[in-house]
Image (cartoon, grey):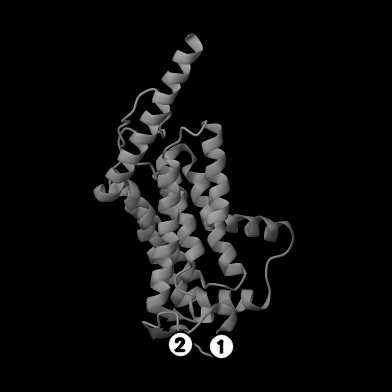
Amino acid sequence: MDGLIDQLDAPPVTPRVTGLPRPPVTETSPPSITWRLPVTFLGLAVICFLFLDQPVGQFFSKRGLKGDLADAVNAAEHFGTPFGQLMILGSIAAVSCWRAGYVARILAGALAGGLAADVVKLLIARTRPRAFDYASTSMLPSFTELFPFGASGASYQSFPSAHTACAFAFAAMLTWAYPTGRRAFVIIACLAGLQRVCCGAHFLSDACAGAALGWVVGTLFFTWPPLSKSFDRLEAWWSNRLESRSRQTSSTESA
């Protein structure tokens, strides 16, 4: 996993407006690197479903983490919530004097990751670990219905983890903007997914599937032209607006 994280460099982005802060990006990045992480997590989801979901789910449905480790994991949950992400992005915007026009793109990508997971929940019903009958020797009965559209209730909306999807979409967007922090972003996103498992809300395979889905959705916001070009225009407009206001202020002070 460490070697995989080392390769999570952002795709090339050409700055469009000079004189204003832009995300530090790398010169080159093979497109295949962007998809290695979600493919890895999909593979892990299959392995977890076959071998780990039952023992791990049963363990955390009866007991949880304690002490400082529990506090650290619980704190990481907010990396995958809109409120936590807003606090992080608000800090970024404040220290950049509100010149970080890409903040809107990062937030939109993160929220889209969570919404994508919520859509899948409406299509596939899976029992949450704390509501599952572990008398079964197989995890197949945990998947109860196709196309329930929410009728089964929250206890049957385990797959995939929306918190984890939101966290990994956020990590993908932050990696695009600040590639030097990619290790920290992915590790914190993993802790957010772990928190959902430890509290009995999701199986390990749900978290892994959410991670893959969230990363893919987040990546679309800087690789898929219809999305990326729309935000390019928005960011250019915001940068030019601030630059124009800065020139006006300088002219007024000079006079």
Which residue is pictured at 45% across the width and 84% down the height? 151
Q: Position of residue 242 (x, y in %)?
A: 42, 29
Residue 145, image quadrant: bottom left
Which residue is pictured at 42% across the width and 63% down the height? 115
**Tags 2 and 1 in contact by the CB under 8 Å rule?**
yes
Which residue matches tag 1?
133
* Looking at the image, residue 60 lies above or below residue 93: below
Instruction: Give the residue at the far left of this rendering.
Output: 225
Q: Is residue 6 visible?
A: no
| Amino acid carrying mark 1 in the image | Asp
Q: Secondary structure at mark 2?
A: helix
Would you say 21 lies left or right of 59 here? left
Which residue is pictured at 41% across the width and 33% down the height? 24
Observer-nearest of 94 and 129: 94
Q: Mark 1 or mark 2, which is nearer the start of the sequence?
A: 1
Q: Secondary structure at mark 1?
A: loop
Observer-nearest of 250 and 119: 250
